[in-house]
Amino acid sequence: MTLARRIAIAAAGGTLLLAACSNERSYIGFEDAGGLPPSFTPQPDAGDASTADALESAEIPMCVATECPAPYATCGEAPSFLCATNLQNDRENCGACGVTCSAFVGGLNMGGRCVDGKCAFECMKLGPLGNFRDCNGVLDDGCETDIAFDPTNCGGCGQACAPGVRCFEGKCGCSGGKVDCNGTCIDLRNDHENCGACGALCEDPPDACDPLPENAFYSCRGAKCGQLVCIGRNGDCNKDLHLGCASDGCETNLATDPNNCGACGLACAPGQECRDQGNGPECLDPCAQSGMAECLRGCRDLRHDPQNCGACGNVCPVGHAHQLSACTKGVCELVCEPGFADCNGSPFDGCEVDLRAHPGNCGACGHECNQTAGQPCIEGKCLMGPCDAGVVTK
């Protein structure tokens, strides 16, 4: 059976199941955690002229319900909880128990997810080095084309490059004045290993300075080897490198100098400082002005930053299952993920209870559904239904 046929069957199966269950939604209710027992309202006499109005305004008594309302189901041979699977969005039980959206995508550069009870497949995008598409229109081989590097489908299906021209990150040929050197785009004007031509490696000139000017070394500049260039984020702001050994080198730190922040001549406003917050040197207000501390990687809020909690570099510990690290008023703590709780009070198993589905801790620790009757916990509430003369519904 082809992949396309399997997907069609899976989608059809999910649709039929959801349609069969849809009528139950109008009368299924839920008991809030800590809710009161159901109350019973006498039915109006059949001969009373106001019967219809009384029925409409009467509060319908609710009792324990045990039948899963759509789109919830009990899936698996040994399920953890009743009605714990939402067939509308569960990737392993999409539309019906056992219909998996992940089984079709292995090795095909596809991702599968469950949307409204049907499997939806999409091609994977892994950034500039992997952007896949289904260019041949055949579903069985998935998303077979990487449009980031395929010269016959460069940047999109059917967009072919000229003969002999490679595809780089979805564009034909190299851009920005760079040249294709054995499959890599190179700027021949300043590349130490490809100076002026592919494969032209620079070496120090025979009359090299000893010692070298400060923060400078010999490399490629203007497509010529043997030129003094600056190291890292240092700049030759007084422009005397052309003097060779008589130069004072790259005398300016472009990462911290407020008069030359990121580039020579780029001055910060009065009161600002030059620092790198992760986007390169920038003119920024002092950290203290916004109530933060200056750490190695810029301004940090020591009161709430779990990577700098109470002090720069103080990383809060990683928790156990379903726990998140948090920093509150400069003190590390572990908090539960939404929907989970630490009901046993043990620090060793994290937030072990799923309050959305656990019948013994439904919506809150200790709030029990009627497990003897088989009452499920759905989305943190014990399932309830209209009472039938006081008899518990199925």
Image (spheres, helix red, strand yellow):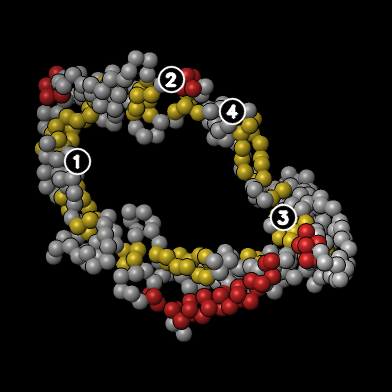
Describe the element under mark 2 as helix, strand or loop: loop
Quadrant for residue 255, please give it: top left
Which one is nearer the viewer's eye here, 229 or 114? Answer: 114
Q: Is residue 261 above or below residue 136?
A: above
**What is the CA distance from the residue labelled 4 to the residue labelled 3?**
32 Å
Check the picture and name the quadrant holding the C terminus. Answer: bottom right
Q: Any mark on residue 380, and which?
A: 3
Q: Earlier in the sequence, mark 1 or mark 2?
A: 1
Residue positioned most to the top: 270
Please tell me how crowded label 3 is: few (under 14), some (14-19), or many (20+) other residues with Cα within 10 Å: many
**What is the CA distance from the residue labelled 1 to the residue labelled 2?**
38 Å
Q: Earlier in the sequence, mark 4 or mark 2?
A: 2
Please, what is the three-letter code of the amino acid marked with disc 1?
Answer: His
Front tag of 3 and 2: 3
Please, what is the three-letter code of the amino acid marked with disc 4?
Answer: Arg
Q: Any mark on residue 303, and which?
A: 4
Q: Earlier in the sequence, mark 1 or mark 4?
A: 1
**What is the CA distance from the residue labelled 1 to the residue labelled 4?**
46 Å
Disc 1 to disc 2: CB gap under 8 Å: no
**What is the CA distance from the residue labelled 4 to the residue labelled 2?**
18 Å
Describe the element under mark 1 as helix, strand or loop: loop
Describe the element under mark 4 as helix, strand or loop: loop
**What is the CA distance from the residue labelled 3 to the residue labelled 2?**
47 Å
Please, what is the three-letter code of the amino acid marked with disc 3?
Answer: Gly
Disc 4 to disc 3: CB gap under 8 Å: no
Q: Is residue 193 above or below residue 137?
A: above
- Residue at point 66%, 72% (across, down): 23
